[in-house]
Amino acid sequence: MAKDCLELNLDGIEELPKVISIEDIKLEKNEYVVMIGADIISYRKKYHSQPVKKT
């Protein structure tokens, strides 16, 4: 579910955010980092492809 949400939000962005190192993320007390993988290219192919009528 988090993957779907991330892909949906990133789909509307023309220039994707730059990747940063986990060590560069500043965390407050009781916060933690969760890594979520997202494949924007396959997401766009799946949801933005147009069917081709072959008749």
Image (cartoon, rainbow, N blue to C red):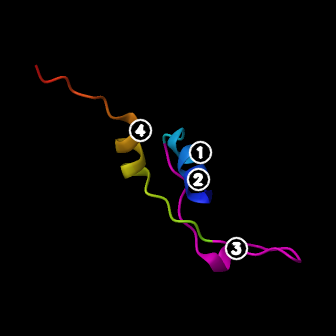
Where disc 3 sits, the SS reads: loop
* SS assignment at label 1: helix
Instruction: Say what secondary structure mark 2 lies in.
Output: helix
Q: Mark 1 points at which residue?
A: 9
Q: How far apart are marks 2 and 3 (CA)?
A: 15 Å
Q: In which quarter of the image is residue 31?
A: bottom right
Up the image or down, 55 lies above or below 17; here it is: above
Residue lying at 58% horizontally and 75% vertically, measured from the top left: 21
Which residue type carries mark 2? Leu
Question: Could you tell me which residue is drawn at 70 percent across and 72 percent down?
Answer: 25
Please state the extent of the stretch shown in magenta in the rendering.
15-34
Residue farthest right in this picture: 29
Q: Nearer the viewer, mark 4 or mark 1?
A: 4
Q: In this view, does 35 lie above or below 8?
A: below
Q: Name the residue under label 3.
A: 33
Spatial CA span between label 4 and label 1: 13 Å
Report the quarter where the C terminus lies: top left
- Going by the numbered disc 3, the residue's amino acid type is Val
Between the residue at mark 4 and the residue at mark 2, the CA separation in whole angstroms equals: 14 Å
Residue highlighted by disc 4: 47
Q: Is residue 15 left or right of residue 36?
A: left
**In the image, residue 50 above or below residue 47:** above
Q: Is residue 53 left or right of residue 29?
A: left
Q: What element carries label 4?
A: helix
Q: Distance between the residues labelled 1 and 2?
A: 5 Å
Q: Where is residue 9 in the image (x, y as percent from the top left)?
A: 59, 45
**Foreground: 5 or 16?**
5
Q: Quadrant of the image for the N terminus?
A: bottom right
What's under tag 4, amino acid-wise?
Tyr
Please give the residue where the numbered disc 2 appears in the rendered image: 6
Tell which circle, 3 or 1, labels the residue nearer the N-terminal end: 1
